[in-house]
Image (cartoon, rainbow, N blue to C red):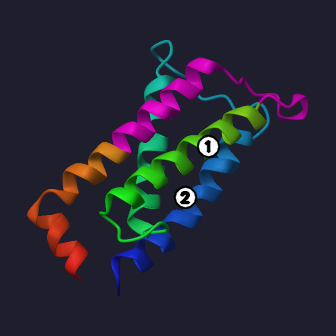
Amino acid sequence: MKYATLARRCFWPYVALIFTLTHWPNLQVPNPVPRTDIFVHMCVFGLWTVLAGLCGFFGPVFSARNIVRTGIAAALYAAFDEGTQAFEFVHRHAGWDDYSANVLGVLAGCGTLWLVSRTALGKMMAAA
């Protein structure tokens, strides 16, 4: 099975799960330390970006074009996700700090894809 096929089988359920969790009305996650959600935002969108990049929607998985366009798409989706939480019926918080953390995660995901592309693992995966 190609890596892109496996990545797509993981990506779409992940997208559905993240959208559901970020739009669940009044969802409260207890945080023992204030603002740990910022770290969660970074991790969630970092993984979103890596999975989307591995899907190869914009060309060969480890090409600069795919990584850059995946980053742009991820940042746009993060804006959509954060912005739609502002609707009154969702009863969620939408903020620039959360979106900034999302974008930091997107950048980390793009950086991860770029770093892997420069390793033997990336070259092996690109050849498969």
Question: Is label 2 in a helix, a strand or a loop?
Answer: helix
Q: Position of residue 54 (x, y in %)?
A: 38, 65
Q: Position of residue 85 (x, y in %)?
A: 75, 33
Q: Is residue 74 left or right of residue 33?
A: right
The range drawn in magenta is 86-109
Task: Return the residue nearer the eye: 117 or 35.
Answer: 117
Q: Residue at x 14, y 66 (%)?
A: 121
User: Tag 1: residue type?
Assistant: Leu
Q: Residue at x 43, y 27 (%)?
A: 39
Residue at the spot of label 2: 14
- Mark 1 or 2: in front is 1
Q: Residue at x 43, y 69 (%)?
A: 56
Mark linked to residue 76: 1
Q: Main secondary structure of the magenta part?
A: helix
Task: Return the residue nearer the eye: 88 or 61.
Answer: 61
Q: Position of residue 69 (x, y in %)?
A: 48, 54
100 magenta-colored: yes
